[in-house]
Amino acid sequence: MTIGVRYRLGVASRAVAAIFGGYGIAALSAAVLALCLPAAFGMARSEAAMTGTLASFAIFAFAVMWVFAARTALRAWSGLVIVAAPLAALLLLLMRTTGGAA
Amino acid sequence: MKEGFRQSMAWLHTWSGLLVGWVLFMVFAAGTASYFKDEITFWMKPELHAVAQNAVPPVKAVESAVAYLQQRAADSPRWFINLPNERQPSTDVLYLAPPAPAGAAAAVTGAKPGEKPRRRFDRASLDPATGEAVSAPRVTRGGEFFYRLHFDLHYMPALWARWIVGFCAMFMLVAIFSGIVTHKRIFKDFFTFRPKKGQRSWLDAHNVTAVLALPYHLMITYTGLVTLMFMYMPWGPQVAYKDRGGEQAFFSEAFPGGGRDQIKASGNRVPLAPIAPMMAQASAHWGGAAVGRVTVHQPNDANAVVSLTRAEGPQLSYDQPSMQFNGATGALIGAFGDVPKPAAETRGVLYGLHIGRFGDPLLRALFFLSGLAGCLMVATGLLMWAVKERQKFAKTLKRGGRVSFGLRLVDGLNLGAIAGLPVAMAAFFWANRLLPVDVAERGEAEIRWFFIVWGATAVLGLLRPTLRMWQAQLALGALLFAGLPVLNAFTGPAPLTVSLRTGPTSVAGFDLVVIALGLGLAGAAWIVERKRRKSIAKQAAAKTQPPPSTLATSGQGS
Amino acid sequence: MTTDSLLLGLVFAASLAGFCALSLAMDRHSEDVFGRGSTPGPWRRWLQLGGTALLCLSLGASLQAAGSAIGWVLWLGALTAAALTTVGLLSAVPGRFHWIASAAAVLALGAALLHLVLAALAAS
């Protein structure tokens, strides 16, 4: 694989990570905030959902910046996974405990 | 990216800006124009310029509107009555067609889309004094066209357009953040602008228009995303309300008293209670503030509900408190939104900042100025990329070769997007006055001219992305804009000489602003002329040395 | 929004004067205005302090004129207009820059004084 092709693949890989991975992390954050803010601070449910959504765009932008600042494409993806995994786990936990209950 | 953080952010800034720059320029230009959309619409209805606008008591405006609606839409499940105000002298009514069989959900006017299928609604502009449909002025979309253009685009389903624009807005947000990171000398270069220094000047212009209006750019981009955030990022409400009524429940809790509540008809016909006492009670509750909108759910039914929303005022938030009354008896059901919850209020303020419907013209003028800075920021960024890229081809060009396809494409797109858009906007206004009044679908016809002209400039730009083409389009834009007051003088009752003395002030304002814009475009054409002469002089100097072949100067873009 | 023209004039004059002062505190723009090799010298701190103070004055006037929410929006908009004007002046008329800046500062301080006097008279 020539350096040129390698470079382009790297950029493409990061673009995918940034757009989809970044969105995923933003979405996860919005959902997690919506559920954990009421649990942790007693915030009203609609308020927490609103707050999570408002914050998500900044989180998306920071995720994108991380992806392109990381030294290699692999690091970029790894960084996203390292953040996404606990968020997803936390989300599942919160949904099970607070999601359905009245 | 093996380079440092600043350098990787520079790369990100370049590409996140370039890839969506052409769309963003249009979004900025159309959005900036929208701050004065009511005034633009008014200019485009010259039939109204001579008529004195007498203020009609709000109660009369509502009662005449109700009479109109009772005649035409007594069976409609929902009426919206938007009261006249300073910027919008007629009463705007909208009403839904009577419901189809079970399953059809009620639609809401434009602004909050995404989760329900939209149903047809009819609208009319009424004279507030008589309640009759205003038929005198020509049909035109007016300033609403630019407003809708900047997020609904055109000739495509609104949903697609909003995703496209949202995508571009997200890229823009990334471009702003990465731009801040990469601009090492942000304070040292705060006031720096060195004209006539080629690439340096482009960079200075880009930095100045970006940094000096940075609070605005950050605000407008983020708040733009916020206005459609429930469409782009519904996960918070969805997850939090998964087993509690879904998003509908979220909206009822977050925005109590809003028009989203579903009121079902009972089937018993009961005449609608008079609205005047409701308006008095609401105004009193709001400390004298006026009513802005009256929404009637299931009029002439036993379950009718009348919702009064406060008019726009000095508050920043877009969300206004409302009061609901029983539509059959006139009794108060409740007051909502008087003390909004913090996050909801934050969202309302962010929405209000983006919409910028400040009553005070000074504040709107400042927003307009910052919006223009935004347009220049995007334009200089795009042009700077082309200038830098062209340098890589300096040797090839000297030998008589051509630039890459990519650069030629960017050159052409830059031309069509930046120089062509003003020409198209001016053409829209010229079409407004030159198209016959009784042309079918007049509103769409004017819009078609906008796109025809823009398409033509884009095609010409792609075919010949030369300095001469830049000059031609910029000069044409300058002429068309500066000529608008002349056009107004010949096709309307309020030329500048009249409007400056006795009004309408908004017509005078429009005429003055387009002259200024024309001068600005002429200035840009002059800058291109200077550059053209400089590059001709450089080539003449180069010719005195024996060149390997005669120069076939192609692709002299920016 | 209640527009008190005096206060609004103050907002703009103070922002312009503030940014002009801050720019003159920089070597680069001192050179633009006073010629090559010139520096603000002992005036640098004073220009920086004065400039900042003028910007704060314009914020105060803005909050007074338009309330605690819209006042911030008005201030930021005025800052943008003032900063753009400062850059324009440095480019177009560097020779007269310090006169214009001084005039703006005098206008701003005068307007502030006038406003205080009028407010005191109205209160008494």
Image (tube, helix red, strand yellow):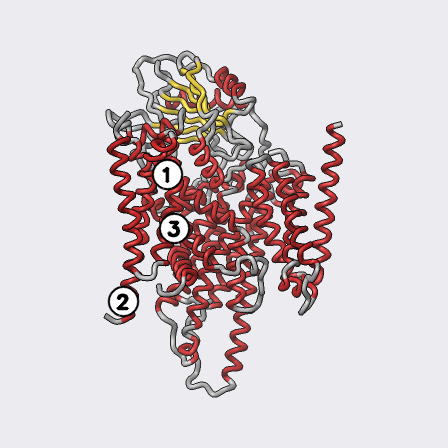
Discs 2, 1 touching: Cβ within 8 Å: no
Residue labelled with disc 2? A6
Q: Earlier in the sequence, mark 2 or mark 3?
A: 2
Number of residue marks:
3
Residue type highlighted by circle 2: Arg
- Mark 1 highlights which residue? A52
Q: Is residue C124 left or right of residue B415?
A: right
Element under disc 2: helix
| Camera-nearest residue between B524 and A58 | A58
The spot of residue B356 in percent (x, y) is: 50, 40
Tell me which amino acid carries mark 1.
Answer: Gly
Q: Residue C76: where, in percent of width, then height? A: 56, 45
Q: Nearer the viewer, residue B26 or B123?
A: B26
Separation of marks 2 and 3 at Cα, in angstroms: 25 Å
Q: Which mark is residue A62?
A: 3
Q: Amino acid at mark 3?
A: Phe
Tell me the chain of label 2: A
Residue that lies at the very extreme toward the bottom in this rendered image: B546
Question: Mark 2 or 3, which is nearer the eye?
Answer: 3
- Mark 3, Cα crowd under 10 Å, few <14 / some 14-19 / many 20+, is some
Q: Are marks 1 and 3 on the same chain?
A: yes
The answer to whether residue B265 shows anywhere in this view is yes
The chain containing the residue under callout 1 comes to A
x 52%, y 78%: residue: B538
